[in-house]
Image (cartoon, coloured by chain):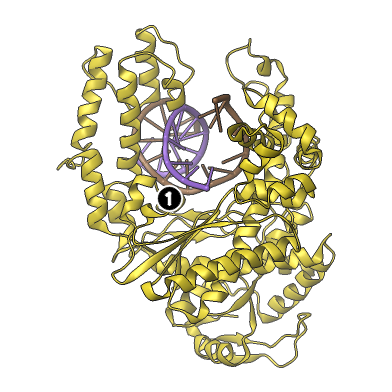
Chain colours: A yellow, B purple, C brown
Amino acid sequence: MAGERGGGELRPLDAAGRPVGPTETVSDLAAAMAAREATEHPRWVWATAGAIYPTLLRAGVRVERCHDVELTEALLLGHAGRWGEPRSLAAAWGRLTGGPVPADPPPRAAAPPGHGQGALFDTLPGPPGPGIEALTQVYADQLARVATTAHPGRFRLLVAAESAGALIAVEMGAAGLPWRAEVHDEILAELLGEPSPVGGPPRRLAELASRIADAFGVRHLHADSPAELLKAFARAGVELPSTRAWVLRGVDHPAVPLLLEYKELYRIWTAHGWSWREQWVRDGRFQSEYVPGGVVSGRWATRGGGALQIPKVIRRAVVADPGWRLVVADAGQLEPRVLAAVSGDARLAAAGGAGDLYAALARDSFGGDRPRAKVALLGAMYGQTGGAAVPALAVLKRSYPTAFGYVEAAARTGEAGGLVRSWLGRTCPPGSVGLGDPDEGPADPDAAADRQSPRARAARSRGRFTRNFVIQATAAEWASTLLATLRTELAGTDAELVFFQHDEVVAHCPAEQAEAVAAAVRRAGERATALLFGDTPVRFPLDLSIVDCYADAA
DNA sequence: CGATCCGGCGCC
DNA sequence: AAAGGGCGCCGGATCG
């Protein structure tokens, strides 16, 4: 329990969360924790890693394990169908004791490196938080609540993985992703031309903008304004529902290819251009902030810099330090493999034992047509109802009824207003009642889908969400279990985890350790599979690359 | 004027 | 191949 000025309180607990010794007040919490870490390897129970671990890391203290009360509270509240209630230690304490339940503080804004980073550790001495007694009792209560879940063993794994994720997120944020500013500059110059000295669009964008205006026969056109574009197209006799790229691709007009290029480059300029680099890259590292559990499905989110949306062309700027390597691991076909494992469909599981699940599926049931097999499986997991996927979906339904039934059941539950859970017990949020606004809806009244009532459309949308949730959330669990295991595996090496994106992890390590790190990633993948699914025939192969540059990863 | 919504697109 | 699930972030448009 952290106090002011680096002091704090410590209390030893047993496995059930009962105190087994007196509370000790220390003046240097980091030092006291470091000492115990070295000798006892405890699981630290604290309100939340984000509030204390950055300070500890800065003091040179790494901890092996923790129990994150806030993240656990969120998981338990969700499981109990109480999504959205405050999750802080103080709130949990209030619910436990019948005291006040404070609202959670609003999420902090992203803090670019070197600007207000202090918010992470120089916390203003606000009102004193709940004391160590509250922490102890809430922890014991959480353990008891976990034991009452449908699958306590799985939920314990979920809590452990989520808590480990909280540690990794802080460490990864502190490490940063190796980033070569001069390479980034070269990419930008190549794509965009020279930056404008006055801060306007760079040369190639300006040229494209004027050519687009020419193509419409006007003097000026705001090419990044959808409204203006729609008007311009309308004047040219082309009525469009939107200016999305895939809509434009079907339009025959001389401005279209220019616009598509403009959109692509404009995005890079605004989202990952020079000013982005100045804001987010410091001392050769892109420093974002990772938020485990930031997405309802359990995927991580990030705050700042759009770390999970780095365009592929920009990844050339991600380069290992001299003498170091990047070990990049990507779990291929993760979501269909998850479906194979959780559904208990023996035939699909057998296909999941292959290195290429789609190919095996195609051989088994689609006459060798791999693209068709892929469309069918993706369509089943995302809830596709139209287009070319429909006949393929029928094949899937006939040949893999158990797997098909699994996602269908999740969809039906969602459509009926029910909740679904991941394999380890993460629960989807409830749908907002009355979501379907009768006024809204696509303009075209002839389209069959729009003849449905808004209520029915909302229900179908909800069904697609719950259908996907059971897969996406379980995939996130597999990935975070891998990550937690990998972190333990790497404890004795110089490797640092520097990036994690849903089903992909990047470690940065001395070249001579790269093979060992790659082997550790493989072991971590096998361990994650065994921890989640036990003795399953489904394999979860990893595409592994040892590279200098992220863009060179397979 | 700032706050918020929306269209659009990057990633998985 | 089709346009479906999850996000964060940008600029423009609009609201108060």
* In the image, farthest residue toward the top: A237
Which of A306 and A316 lies nearest the eye of the viewer?
A: A316
What residue is at 81 percent from the left and 66 percent from the top? A152
Q: Position of residue A151 (x, y in %)?
A: 82, 62
Residue A316 higher or lower than C10, as above or below? below
What residue is at 42 percent from the left and 59 percent from the top? A288
Q: Residues within 10 Å of mark 1 (few under 14, many from 20)?
A: some
- In the picture, residue A78 is in which quadrant? bottom right
Which of A548 and A36 lies nearest the eye of the viewer?
A: A548
Q: Which residue is disc 1 drawn over?
A: A306
Image position of A71 (left or right of A223): right
Residue A313 higher or lower than A207, as above or below? below
Q: Look at the numbered disc 1 and give the secondary structure of its residue.
A: loop
Residue A236 higher or lower than A486, as above or below? above
Q: Position of residue A175 (x, y in %)?
A: 41, 69
- In the picture, residue A294 is in which quadrant? bottom right
Chain for disc number 1: A
The amino acid beneath tag 1 is Gly
Residue A391 higher or lower than A338, as above or below? above
- In the picture, residue A380 is in which quadrant? top right
Residue A233 seen anywhere in this rendered image of the structure? yes
Residue A91 seen anywhere in this rendered image of the structure? no
Q: Quadrant of the N terminus of chain A?
A: bottom right
Q: Position of residue A392 (x, y in %)?
A: 68, 28
Q: Position of residue A148 (x, y in %)?
A: 85, 65
* Tally of numbered discs: 1
